[in-house]
Image (spheres, coloured by chain):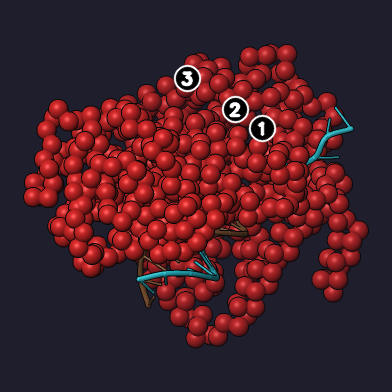
Chain colours: A red, B brown, C cyan
Amino acid sequence: MAEMEAKGEEQDRPWQSYNTVYTNAKAGMDGVDKERVQKIVYEMSKGSKYFENEKRKEASIQQRVDSMRSHCENLTKDELSHFEKIADKRVLELEATRNLSRIWMHVDMDAFYAAVEMLENPSLRGKPLAVGSMSMICTANYEARRFGVRAAMPGFIARKLCPELSFVPPDFKKYQFYSDLARKVFQRYDPHFIATSLDEAYLDVTVICKEQGMDGREVAEELCDGVYKETGLTCSAGVAPNRLLAKVCSDINKPNGQFVLQNDRMAVMTFISSLPIRKIGGIGKVTEQILKNVLGITTCEELQQKRGYIYALFPQCSADFFLSVGLGLGKTGTPQYVPRKSMSSERTFSATSDETLLFHKLEDIAETLSNDMKKDDLYGRTLTLKIKTSTFEVRTRAVSLQRYVNSKEDILCHASKLLKAELPGSLRLIGLRMSQFNDDRIGRGVPIQRTLEEIFNSVDSSSSMTLGSNRENINAVIGCHELNANVLNDSFVDDHGSCLSNATLHSEPGNIRSSGDLPDFNHLHELEHYGDGLLDNFKIERNESSSDQHLESTNQSESNSMTSLFIEEPFCWIDDYRCSLCGVELPPDFLEERQEHSDYHLAAMIQREESGHFPEKTIQKKRS
DNA sequence: GGGAAGGAATAAT
DNA sequence: TTCCAATTATTCCTTCCC
């Protein structure tokens, strides 16, 4: 009966079930006419491709909910009691980690971008303002929020909600400037404060409280005053025994207010008891829906109460998180510096299936990503292509490379292959992400591919190859495609794990080039001056290995030289058609096939050498 | 079976 | 009139390979 009523209501007021954009979780939106906003958002979205995609997503979440519900219903008493025991044990373990000795503060600038714009242009004050564009809003001031306008809402819907809304394009240089001013104030209270974005930071104020004989509230008030004096902008602060709770607290008296939660277990548990789960950082729209619709959980207290079900339904990691939230636990230690894990660039445009245009966009994005990576001196090994179709379906395709790259050419080369595989199709977004950086110097700096160094060394020890200095043979053996170029390149991995750009080494796949288009040794010579004695290391190692009787030792005067390699019976394409080693015939335009073929021979050579079955051939190594 | 890699989903700003 | 972003991180699940 109740279900039928609900269904009838959904038919009468379909916008009620469409909760894509609207949420009252945002500060300053408590008094908003939710029904009106939902209706307008629904009317504006209805029938669009975006809307249809949202429906698909909703359906998929509903499916998850249904499946978890049935899992829940099928739990036997024994099973439930088993999971309750596990959960009870975890409660004790988690409780033992509770630390009430630190005082954490979360500071959040109020409607930051909008506030900066109003500060610089007072004529904007007192009127509804959005920072962003017709397609998307970054943030809105409190006057606009009263109409239901909020961040992550498309501008054209915001204007419908609030026709007098003004728009200002974002200016991140400005925001950075004011952010720096605010951070100078933060620094006075905690020199190791954690900035999580331009307008937010966590401060451990334990020491300053002790030193100044102040409590959390006093420090929060003083800090907010300081920020206002320094920037002319207001901020809100939350004080609590851990960061998770401090973040929740900073939102309570927004804007321009503070909230303090005492470092006391009872106070924490009381605070948590009625707190909606959606207020917790890490619990978003989907998780909220799942917890509510599967287990009827809406408050943090219930996360603790229904812990048996939670451990039965969720993976350990998630269950532990939910339980710790239910206990009011959060991080209290100062985190170590965490190096960046990925870097990306993406662009939205009006949907098109014009491949020339799409590859043009891809090139632009590859260039942006490459430039960004170069700024931070990053080289990555995993490239991910992200696309969004005209129907808003998002897909990602990744490839792990043989070596670390950051040049536009390398990125574009691999990205093009990934994109090609997804076409034809109409796209509205293309993005590229690079990950698996070589910045930790341990392990990851070592290329997957064996280096020439290693090959030399192992070969030297087997005394079975001849190394020479014939340019053509370098090309012949190394081959002209990427895998082989990698081997060459990987010899130049520095102690930072960085790898030289292969701009001078990269060559077209498949073809054996005549000596005229061989890698330019002058460039290789230049490479010796790259980085912090990069090739000095290379040379030193070389010299160490040169003690081998088959190697001619080198002296410093030969420092401008380069090691090369020669194998008798070099691999080449006879008449530009037939493989010199096995006779297989491949036309010159079968680039990829030729590439694979030369790979095969090189791999076989390495394998033979590794297994000690390399045919007895004379190997010489010398520096020319 | 375990680890690495790929892919999708989720979340936060 | 415009017609739903960009960036980074994490988690979970699946697939593949050894």
Residue denoted by label 1: A139
In the rendered structure, which disc, 3 or 1, sits on the residue that comes first in sequence?
A: 1
Task: Name which residue lies at 37% across and 23% down.
Answer: A188
Q: Position of residue A617 (x, y in %)?
A: 21, 59
* Chain under numbered label 3: A
Q: Position of residue A505 (x, y in %)?
A: 39, 39
Q: Is residue A329 visible?
A: no
Question: Contact, CB < 8 Å: mark 2 with mark 1?
Answer: yes
Q: Mark 1: few, some, or many residues within 10 Å (few <14, many ≥20)?
A: many
Q: Position of residue A376 (x, y in %)?
A: 41, 32
Drawn side of residue A526 relative to residue A325, left or right? left
Residue denoted by label 2: A112
Give the quadrant of the N terminus of chain A.
bottom right
Question: Contact, CB < 8 Å: mark 3 with mark 2?
Answer: no
Image: A171 above or below A415:
above
Give the quadrant of the C terminus of chain A.
top left
Amino acid beneath label 2 = Phe
Image: A297 above or below A620:
below
Drawn side of residue A22 relative to residue A225, left or right? right
Image: A312 above or below A403:
below
Name the residue furthest front: A575
Residue denoted by label 3: A181
Q: Nearer the viewer, residue A542 or A86?
A: A542
